[in-house]
Image: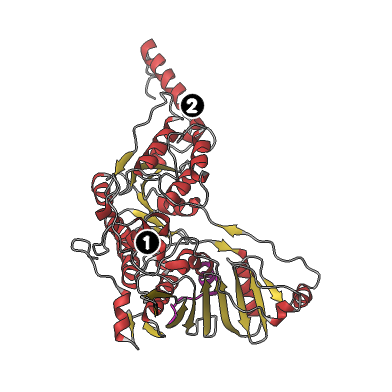
Amino acid sequence: MAPARKINRREFVGSAALASMAFTIVPRHVVGGTGYVAPSDKLNLAYIGCGTQGMREMVGLIANPKLQITSVCDPNKLSTNYIDWSPYGIRNSIRKALGDDSWGANFNGIMGGRDIGHDFVTKYYAKNKPSGKYKGCQSYEDFRELLEKESGIDAVKVMTPDHLHATVSIAAMKKGKHVVIHKPIANRMYETKLTIDTARKTGTSTHLLAWSKRSGNDVVKKWIADGAIGNLKEIHNWSYRPVWQQWTQNPTETQPVPDGFNWDLWLGPVPDRPYHPNYTHCVFRGWYDFGGGSIADMGHYSLWPLFLTLGVKTPAYSAEAYGTTTRTTVDGVSKGVVNDVAFPYSSIVRFKFAKQDTLPAFDLFWYDGGMKPHTPEELEVDGKDMPQEGMMFVGDKGKILAEFRCENPVLLPESRMKSYLAGKPAPEETTVRGDDVWIDAFQSKTQSPGSFLYAGAISETINLGAVALRAGKRVVYDSAKMEITNDAEANKFLRREYRKGWEL
């Protein structure tokens, strides 16, 4: 047996100190308190697009402890000429988040731009610093410069107008950054398919913010499977939108580009044209070049979750569309207005779908601008009219009526619903959505349930509606070839003409 080794006082004290340290080490979340996320565990996010919707969502997102907004970007430096749903809604939400009732008092009008985004991020993070200062957020005019310089970001949130969605998303994914984006993925068929293909090839995590999991869709699926309405024949979906001003022709007058607004960057891939405020801010969505119309704005929210639930995996193979027409007077002569620049004030689009794994072939009808289906007899029996927005499922043996996003579905007429429930309460409404869905996916480098990879059918269908409106006739579409097969001329609407240097 080896003799016991004597240790001196210095060794004893050192050993005791190490032992004490070993017993006092605690996890970071304990040190930081409940909900604490270590800086190294946060998702570093670049925020591209600081207009009204961008700022509205930034206010809610920035409070999430799982991420850090490290940079903001917008071709507009700062202006107070934005359009929104209320004059002070965004300003007041920022004041509340900052705990500062005087924020923005020096501005008149609805504000936006990268200076507003940067100021809010800086002041929000500064209020939780002992020094009261924060310098960790960078500001950029050009998203390309941001992607080159901000190598430490993990993801980008794209809040630009629709025409830049594909351009920014593809550039970010090629840099290995995850992408979360507002609908649509793109407002051209080619760009939509290219963006989804880029997501697949790069392996980045992606999320389309129109995703949600709504119990109403599950109820409709069950009722259809149970034969409550017989074989599904039609799905109808209607919205009162647009909620932005629309035009039928490009503006003819010119206006100077506002100070601090980079018109060239805002145009991005779209061919050159003179600046005009009627293209920008909240009204961009009404133009074929810049937006996707009401169906891209709201149809994603209602139809994509439905497609995912019902198992609609292939896009519509044809679309036929009708839009509002108008006339003008020239030298006392009434003439029709030829509109190939903007979505109509209202429209009806009929899509045809092939048989799916769990559904027969069916037609999908989209209505906007105040258009909606005629009130069915089953609803008239109950003395009711069609709601302002809604969904209706028509089978050969009955109908289901629901609110716009397939909420609160009921069998028609009410007497049939009561008979079907047999005294049981109607199913409770539940909805799953929110930022944690994509943040958790990005942090674990997995695909979110709202991944671009699952959005092909809805994205192609919505873009096909715009093609049908512009073609002015029923178009037949081959998704595998990305081709309109019955009208060669209509294929030009699947792509855009790119400015030099912005090609995709």
Residue 215 is situated, as x and y percent measured from the top left of the image, at 62, 64
- Asked if residue 355 is among those painted magenta in the image, a careful observer would answer no
Q: Quadrant of the C terminus?
A: bottom left
Amino acid at circle 2: Phe
Give residue 23's mark. 2
- Is residue 208 positioned above or below 366 on the image? above
Residue 9 in which image quadrant: top left
Could you tell me which residue is drawn at 59 percent across and 63 percent down? 214
Amino acid at circle 1: Asp
Q: Earlier in the sequence, mark 1 or mark 2?
A: 2
Residue placed furthest toward the right: 423
- Is residue 360 positioned above or below 337 on the image? below
Give residue 444's mark. none
Residue 41 is situated, as x and y percent measured from the top left of the image, at 41, 41
From the viewer's perspective, is 463 left or right of 370? Answer: left
Q: Nearer the viewer, residue 259 or 404?
A: 259
Give residue 162's mark. 1
Residue 11 in which image quadrant: top left
From the viewer's perspective, is 504 left or right of 469? Answer: left
Q: Nearer the viewer, mark 1 or mark 2?
A: 1
Q: Secondary structure at mark 1?
A: helix
Residue placed furthest toward the front: 332
Residue 481 appears in view: no
- Asked if residue 313 is among those painted magenta in the image, a careful observer would answer yes
Neighbourhood count class around disc 2 (C-alpha, 10 Å): few under 14, some 14–19, many 20 upward: few
Residue 394 is situated, as x and y percent measured from the top left of the image, at 62, 81
Circles 1 and 2: CB distance less than 8 Å? no
- Is residue 372 positioned above or below 260 on the image? below
Could you tell me which residue is drawn at 49 percent across and 34 percent down? 98
From the viewer's perspective, is 423 left or right of 8? Answer: right
Residue 46 is situated, as x and y percent measured from the top left of the image, at 35, 47
Which residues, given as a range, are shown in magenta?
305-317
